[in-house]
């Protein structure tokens, strides 16, 4: 019995599954994407806001930095114009531009008023000619001619008022145009005058700045030549003297050691009773060689060891200095010192030539 119940339950479930497969409606497939939706997505992807959202942080920071730099440059330019007084000239230039546009509009109004005056005058002249023609044959008027004369008389009266109004408008427009033209010419002259004054001020400031730079270069030249250079030369001489003192001490020590060695050798040679002539002769030769070595040491010039005050107060040292400039004395000089001397000479020459040129120009 349990087996039969299980089988019955199995077949029942199988029949239910088959019925569901037979009678169940399959789900419809997803519709294909609409072309309008795709076009909208492509358009949205090309929008500036979408492109802005894709920018990296570094690109955004660089853009912000460039914007700040441009703003500061414009602010600096405006500040420079305010300091130099060019902002007032810019205001005059803006006023001239506005007056120039107003003058163009006024000229257009003058042309329109002149055309209206010419049209009104032409119509009135034609009306007057027709009235004159009718008056010439007044005796032969018909009722139509009488009506035409009345109409022409009324039209002439209206045209007379229109001509007067057009003439007044033309006169007013011409007056406004002349006023704007005079104001524009005055503004242009004022701007030219102010720009001339501004350029003279800038040129004057540039001249004083050039003189200031030349004076500063001259002061630096004097400081280097009469204060820094003697101090550096004195320190260099002091270092050379100390080095020579050390060298002389070493030579003296070597000579004393050589002398002691020679004495020991001489005692050792005389001790067995043999007189060696080479030993006594070697001592003077060594002494002469040591003296020659000491003479080959470069000794600084006595003129370089003096101060400027002592040098200027003693005329005898001037001759020694002049002779020392043309002597065969060897001087140890670094490449940096030689370059400094060349630049100082060039600066001094430029200052002298510039001063001569400015004096000649004045």
Image (tube, rainbow, N blue to C red):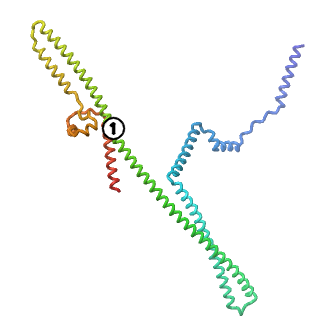
Is the residue marked by circle 1 packed among few (<14), some (14-19), or many (20+) residues within 10 Å? few
- Examine the rendered structure and indicate whether residue 244 appears above or below residue 184: above
* Residue at the disc numbered 1: 227
Report whether residue 111 is seen.
Answer: no
Residue 157: x %, y % from top left: 70, 81
Residue 342: x %, y % from top left: 31, 40
Residue closest to the far front: 313
Element under disc 1 = helix
- Figure quadrant of residue 266: top left
Which of 140/332 is in front?
332
The structure residue drawn at horizontal position 22% and vertical position 21%, both measured from the top left corner, is 251
Q: Quadrant of the C terminus?
A: bottom left
Report whether residue 47 is seen.
Answer: yes
Q: Quadrant of the N terminus?
A: top right
Q: Is residue 193 left or right of residue 64?
A: left
The structure residue drawn at horizontal position 50% and vertical position 63%, both measured from the top left corner, is 189
The structure residue drawn at horizontal position 53% and vertical position 49%, both measured from the top left corner, is 79
């Amino acid at each position: 019995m349990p087996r039969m119940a299980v089988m019955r339950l199995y077949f029942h479930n199988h029949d239910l599954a088959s019925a569901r497969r037979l009678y169940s409606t399959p789900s419809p497939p997803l519709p294909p994407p609409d072309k309008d939706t795709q076009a909208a997505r492509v358009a949205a992807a090309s929008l500036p806001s979408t492109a802005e959202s894709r920018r990296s942080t570094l690109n955004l920071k660089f853009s912000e930095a460039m914007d700040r730099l441009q703003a500061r440059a414009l602010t600096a330019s405006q500040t420079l114009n305010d300091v130099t007084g060019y902002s007032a000239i810019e205001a005059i230039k803006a006023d001239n531009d506005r007056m120039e546009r107003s003058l163009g509009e006024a000229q257009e109004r003058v042309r329109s008023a002149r055309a209206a005056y010419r049209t009104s005058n032409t119509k009135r002249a034609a009306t007057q000619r027709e009235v004159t023609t009718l008056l010439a044959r007044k005796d032969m008027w018909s009722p139509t001619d009488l009506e035409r004369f009345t109409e022409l008389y009324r039209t002439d009266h209206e045209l007379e008022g229109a001509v007067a109004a057009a003439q007044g408008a033309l006169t007013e427009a011409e007056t406004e145009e002349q006023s704007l033209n005079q104001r524009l010419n005055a503004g242009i002259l004022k701007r030219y005058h102010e720009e001339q004054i501004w350029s003279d001020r800038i040129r004057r400031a540039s001249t004083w700045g050039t003189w200031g730079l030349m004076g500063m270069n001259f002061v630096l030249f004097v400081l280097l030549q009469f204060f820094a250079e003697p101090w550096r030369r004195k320190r260099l001489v002091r270092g050379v003297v100390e080095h020579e003192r050390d060298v002389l001490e070493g030579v003296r020590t070597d000579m004393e050691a050589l002398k002691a060695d020679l004495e020991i050798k001489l005692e050792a040679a005389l001790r067995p009773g043999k007189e060696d002539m080479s030993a006594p002769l070697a001592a003077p030769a060594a002494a002469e060689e040591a003296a020659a070595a000491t003479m080959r040491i470069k000794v600084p010039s006595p003129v370089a060891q003096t101060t400027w005050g002592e040098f200027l107060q003693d005329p005898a040292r001037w001759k020694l200095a002049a002779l020392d400039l043309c002597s065969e004395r060897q001087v140890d000089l670094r490449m940096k010192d030689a370059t400094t001397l060349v630049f100082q000479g060039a600066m001094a020459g430029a200052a002298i030539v510039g001063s001569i040129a400015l004096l000649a120009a004045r």
